[in-house]
Image (tube, grey):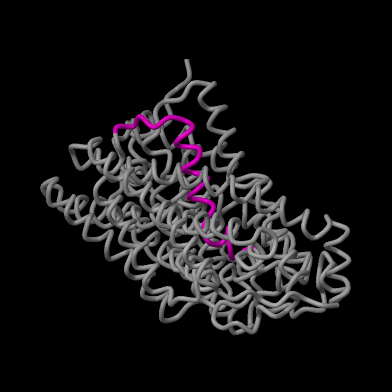
Amino acid sequence: MEFLAVPTATAASGLWAAIGVAAMLLVTLWIGLMGRRRWGTFDEYMVGKRAMGPITTGCAVAAAYLSGWAFCGSAGISYMLGWSGMWFAGIWTLVGIMPCVWFTALRTRELSAKLGATTLPELLGRRFGSKASQTIISLVMLVYLLMYSIGQLKAAGGTWHVVTGWNPLACLLVAVIVTWIYMTLGGYTATQWSMAFQGAFLGAVGLVMGIMALVYIGGPTGLNENLAAQSPALIKLMRPELPQLGKTQLFASWIGLLACPMIFFTMATGFPHNVSRFLGMRQLTKKDYAILCLFVWLVAGIPIMIDCAWNGLVARAIYGPALMKIVPWKADLADPTMAWAVGGIPLLTFYTSALFAAALSTLSAMVFIMAGNVSRDLVKLWAPKTKDKTLIWLTRFLLAVFLFLPFYYTLHRPPALLAIFMGFAAIGLGGTFIYVTAVSYYWKGATSLGVITACIFGLVATLWGAWGVMHKTLGMANMFWIVFFGSGICYFLGSFIGKKPAADIINKCFPKKR
């Protein structure tokens, strides 16, 4: 069968992409300027006035979840592997971020207000009455979030390369600077508003793009016919012929397929950059909560499932294996090249803008957490007399540092396959923090010792497991189960052994029902 040639950048595609991305960045910059008026103290800089409504919060939560992995890297998995890649690429976004909303939204807002906490580590530290747990949680989050943030800029850089042919340095640098400006000026409020705008935009683009791709290829029948003509393996739902060790275990065995929904469930509920979006939310009525759920679903449910997973398959049907020869972007070019094929420059312009929105929204959520982890959860915790003005300027400086680190790493050592690299961080974050955060919200018996041992085990197991997967001595699914069950054992065993929080803390966090 004949494939389309991989498109090359033109002056027109570069111009319109630049206009689209510039427009998106200008809107977020304006939002940052407006957000500057909404805070006066360091606490308000970190969490606003706890007045965010359900629509803004819902779109922002969805944007935090829909990273460069979801909007670009997932398509690379299904492009490489066919239908079997769907288990890890996007089918579970049908459930998506909803477990996070169900289990953590209301409790995060409730506990943060009761305990006066402005960051997630601070909330958990006060939940256990333990400076040590707050410190350990903060440091472990830093490591995981740095890993996860690297992938955001690779996704944006790869798309920019396809559209313009330019070196991604200039565009990524501008995007990072604009992100720093609106976070620096507006703090939590501007970051939340900017993410809400970005989330709504990328959800709409994802839905339109996914539908256009299916129509272009002739629906599921046309898609399967094209894939089968290349290789019957591309339409198999499981690939037992692939190696059982390394990253392919997720697609080659039942233990791998069973791990995929658990990975998505734990990362949705355990991701601190998701859960932290609820810190500044206002107290919700039942109607508000229903609106919150609806908007999260509208942005992060079916639209992104269609875009994430199907588009990689459509790209494979259109271009064959040709994308694998384009170094260093390779399969991660599936989404942008597919957009060009099915919708020309107009759709590609919208996709480029949406991809930058997806990457920057998740990046800004994580960077704001990392900066807060140092200024609030380390400096303010151990030097409580530090002035607000000093903490604000320290946080602004740290925002620049934590934006620069993934920017530098992405330019010099971009990960080979975005979804796998970010999957390591997702396994660690989800497998550890589902206990540390979600379970601790509801279980009175949790203790600081359980949290600390779970965090330390989870981090060590994740780093060791990632090394084993990359060197093909361990399957990626087995890595998840080790992190998930091991962190759970440490959490519960440590909680049974450890000292319980003081009675006044328990009564505040778990008031008796009348």
Residue appearing at x 17%, y 51% in the figure:
391
* Left or right: 496 in relation to 337: left
The image quadrant of residue 33 is top left
Left or right: 291 as drawn, with respect to 44: right
**Helix, strand or loop: magenta stretch:** helix
Q: Is residue 162 magenta?
A: no
Q: Position of residue 439 (x, y in %)?
A: 52, 44
In the image, the segment drawn in magenta is 49-74
Q: Position of residue 73 (x, y in %)?
A: 59, 65
In the picture provided, is 57 more to the left or to the right than 136? right
Instruction: Name the one closer to the observer, 441 or 27.
Output: 27
Quadrant of res 173: bottom left
Q: Magenta includes 52?
A: yes
Lateral position of residue 282 relative to residue 469, left or right: left
Tell me, yes or no, if residue 371 can be seen here: yes
Task: Give the image location of residue 265, x and y in percent.
Answer: 62, 50
Is residue 490 something that shows in the picture? no
The quadrant in which the N terminus is found is: bottom right
How many tags in the picture? 0
- Of all residues, the one furthest to the top in this rendering is 514
Percent x, y of residue 326: 60, 82
Compared with 363, 292 (above or below) is above
Relative vertical location of residue 78 with respect to residue 273 in this rendering, above or below? below
